[in-house]
């Protein structure tokens, strides 16, 4: 229906003047005017005279008066009403309160507008007459809230939009059920979960407008509480601030962004504020439950008497809490505020913006500032300009935060350019070109793909590993070129999760760190950092703690790479329930966040083969196995030479021969600890200690060459 009490899109939007409907007659008299009154529709804002309203008629009869002024009012709603079996009704705010009684816009539990208590009524369309031109008063009214229009202004976050549509459907159906005494008591309090740069604020405005338009709260006001609104310097002040904030948000939505900033263990007053807020909403929930129980009891009594069900009463005035946080900080919040799950109705996961969505956000951010993008700056070019800063941006400064900063920087560069050119045309003053976006930000500059590959080439040995990494880089680069060209199927669908199989000391961690940097440079990973862990970092000692521990580690690696060393040790045997829980949780999180991080499982070849054989989920999600072969004697000598060079040491010819013989003997041994770079380092460090002991017996002054030379005896 057409309503005037639904609320707007956001707090900043101004009420709009309702336009006069097409075909309305401006003549004030005569047959044509009368005829057109019957042909005209009724619109919100119209002045009308009510001809057949029982409340008004009864009040007039008591006073023995037929004062027409008492029957006039302003239309607030036109549309179907459930209490009238779906018939189209007109909601009117009367000029004066009739003695027979009215309401505030809510009848039999159904609300379509709000006015002062006692002035509201609903009547059939046939029972109202439009007032003539001289008395008509088209008023400024807020446009009704239309969810689809509000969602069209939001970029990306499709799953969040779908949730809001489902919420709208649920609340609309709940209003119909309420007429029959069936209440929907599921809480509306919501956690927005996603990267810090997501546009949580705009979604919170839409959320507030939606639930207000459907009568879940009295106002669409969204009060955004900052730390200064909630946290004081002592317990008393914190209590006062929280109470004042809750009062401001009464009847609407309280939005607390970055809720994890109140959850640090050392932040006593921050935790106090967070728990006071949650405690308040727990109390509100108890009041709603008590009201629902009392209403159900009244209906049961009426049914037992065989009478008509009592009218649905308006419940206690409540507010709705919305908090936002980064995914990695969720466990911290739940730990600091254990009662949050008891009031939490929904958790909305905001998926990070794609490159195309970031380009759309850039256009919107530019337009919000009164500028426009130059006609030659196509979406494809804009995406390419954004690719590098996005890939190198820290997780807590991405999304809309990054876009707004890039646009501000572009405007600053354009301002300098315009000043130098002394241009005065509108297009040149307010248009941002490709050149304005191309200047690199020093704070976000990172190493190029070629630079990271050069570092990989400097790693000794591992020819097969290097070849595989280069093929991976080529695959991702080709996918990017196809995407720019608009070729279907350009996305790399193969998972990037890998198994590094090899003995200790064969360079697995070093290569993992370089692969993470490469994936960041290519835009596949946002941060490109490496988080190292093992069984001790994933498996807890108590029941129920392992899954939480795994989640914390995985969340810390978001946007980068998680490197699980000695992964085969996660599950020791069939009785290792904690280890199995850790592996199962890890596999699930890997699947849930497959586009947000890369996981590498590392370990001995035989043990890793056994792990994958006994756990099909591991093999299917980690299809890429890279074998790190043991180093040859010549490669081990290169490693030794590199290490000695960093220590400013040299070998005598005899010492070189001695070290070569020892390394050859080591490789012939079946011990898995042999044949790796770590063993070479241990040998050289042992020789350095032997040198120090040898030279300590020499009381004479030693020449620099002798101090920096290892002899064969040092390797004995």
Image (cartoon, helix red, strand yellow):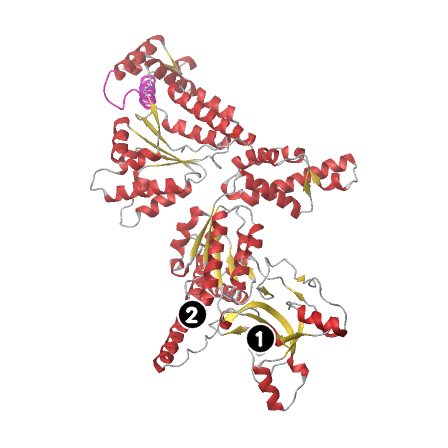
* Vertical arrangement, residue 704 with respect to residue 549, above or below: above
* Vertical arrangement, residue 668 with respect to residue 600, above or below: above
Q: Main secondary structure of the magenta part?
A: helix
Q: Which residues are magenta?
A: 668-695
Seen in the image, is 333 located left or right of residue 715? right
Q: Position of residue 604 (x, y in %)?
A: 28, 28
Mark 2 sits on what residue?
Answer: 288
Q: Position of residue 69 (x, y in %)?
A: 68, 81
Q: Position of residue 370 (x, y in %)?
A: 69, 47
Let me know if residue 671 is in the magenta part: yes
Question: Of residues 140 and 128, which is closer to you in this image?
Answer: 128
Tell which tag, 2 or 1, sits nearer the viewer: 1
* Vertical arrangement, residue 661 with respect to residue 5, above or below: above
Tell me the SS state at disc 2: helix
Q: Residue at x 59, y 78 (%)?
A: 119
Q: Local crowd at mark 1 within 10 Å, few (<14), some, or many (≥20)?
A: some
Question: Of residues 471 and 124, which is closer to you in this image?
Answer: 124
Mark 1 sits on what residue?
Answer: 123
């Amino acid at each position: 229906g057409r309503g005037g009490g639904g609320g707007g899109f956001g707090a900043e939007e101004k009420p709009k003047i309702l336009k006069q409907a097409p075909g309305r007659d401006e003549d004030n008299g005569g047959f044509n005017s009368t005829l057109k009154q019957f042909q005209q529709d009724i619109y919100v804002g119209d002045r009308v005279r009510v001809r057949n309203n029982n409340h008004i008629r009864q009040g007039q009869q008591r006073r023995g008066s037929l004062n027409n002024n008492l029957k006039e009012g302003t239309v607030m709603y036109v549309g179907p009403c459930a209490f009238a079996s779906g018939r189209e009704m007109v909601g009117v705010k009367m000029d004066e309160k009739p003695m027979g009684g009215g309401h505030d816009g809510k009848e039999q539990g159904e609300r379509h507008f709000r006015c002062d208590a006692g002035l509201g009524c609903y009547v059939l369309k046939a029972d109202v007459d439009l007032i003539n031109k001289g008395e008509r008063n088209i008023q400024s009214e807020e446009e009704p809230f239309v969810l689809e229009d509000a969602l069209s202004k939001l970029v990306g976050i499709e799953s969040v939009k779908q949730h809001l549509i489902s919420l709208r459907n649920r609340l609309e159906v709940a209003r119909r059920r309420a007429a029959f005494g069936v209440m929907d008591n599921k809480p509306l309090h919501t956690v927005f979960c996603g990267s810090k740069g997501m546009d949580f604020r705009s979604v919170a405005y839409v959320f507030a407008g939606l639930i207000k338009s459907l009568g879940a709260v009295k106002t669409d006001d969204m009060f955004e509480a900052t730390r200064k609104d909630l946290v004081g310097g002592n317990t008393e002040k914190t209590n006062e601030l929280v109470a004042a904030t809750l009062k401001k948000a009464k009847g609407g939505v309280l939005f607390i962004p970055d809720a994890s900033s109140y959850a640090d263990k050392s932040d006593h007053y921050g935790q106090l504020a967070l728990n006071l807020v949650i405690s308040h909403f727990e109390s509100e929930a108890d009041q709603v439950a008590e009201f629902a129980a009392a209403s159900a009891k009244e209906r049961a009594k009426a049914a037992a008497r065989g009478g008509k069900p009592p009218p649905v009463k308006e419940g206690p005035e409540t507010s709705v809490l919305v908090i936002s946080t980064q995914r990695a900080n969720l466990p911290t919040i739940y730990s600091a505020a254990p009662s949050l799950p008891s009031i939490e109705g929904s958790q909305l996961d905001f998926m990070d913006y794609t490159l195309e969505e970031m380009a759309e956000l850039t256009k919107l951010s530019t337009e919000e500032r009164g500028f426009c993008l130059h006609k030659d700056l196509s979406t494809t070019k804009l995406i390419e300009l954004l690719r590098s800063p996005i890939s190198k941006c820290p997780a807590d400064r991405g999304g809309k935060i990054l876009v707004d900063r890039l646009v501000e920087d572009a405007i600053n560069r354009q301002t300098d350019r315009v000043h130098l050119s002394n241009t005065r045309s509108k297009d040149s003053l307010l248009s941002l070109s490709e050149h304005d976006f191309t200047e690199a930000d020093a704070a976000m500059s990172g190493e190029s793909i070629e630079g990271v590959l050069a570092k990989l080439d400097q790693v000794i040995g591992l020819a097969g590993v290097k070849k595989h990494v280069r093929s991976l880089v080529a695959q991702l680069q080709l996918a990017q070129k196809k995407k720019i060209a608009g070729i279907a199927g350009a996305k790399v669908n193969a998972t990037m999760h890998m198994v590094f199989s090899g003995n200790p000391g064969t360079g697995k961690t070093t290569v993992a760190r370089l692969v993470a940097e490469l994936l960041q440079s290519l835009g596949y990973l946002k941060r490109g950092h490496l988080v190292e862990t093992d069984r001790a970092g994933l498996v807890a000692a108590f029941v129920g703690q392992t899954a939480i521990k795994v989640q914390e580690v995985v969340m810390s690696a978001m946007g980068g790479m998680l490197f699980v060393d000695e992964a085969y040790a996660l599950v020791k045997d069939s009785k290792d329930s904690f280890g199995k829980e850790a592996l199962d949780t890890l596999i699930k999180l890997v699947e849930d966040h497959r586009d947000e991080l890369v996981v590498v499982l590392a370990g001995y070849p035989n043990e890793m083969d056994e792990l994958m054989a006994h756990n099909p989920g591991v093999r299917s999600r980690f299809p890429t196995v890279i074998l790190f072969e043991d180093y040859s004697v010549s490669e081990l000598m290169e490693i030794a030479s590199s290490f000695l060079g960093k220590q400013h040491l040299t070998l005598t010819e005899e010492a070189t021969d001695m070290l070569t013989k020892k390394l050859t003997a080591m490789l012939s041994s079946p011990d898995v600890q042999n044949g790796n770079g770590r063993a070479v380092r241990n040998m050289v460090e042992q020789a350095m200690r032997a040198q120090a002991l040898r030279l300590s017996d020499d009381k004479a002054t030693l020449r620099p060459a002798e101090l920096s030379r290892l002899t064969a005896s040092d390797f004995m």
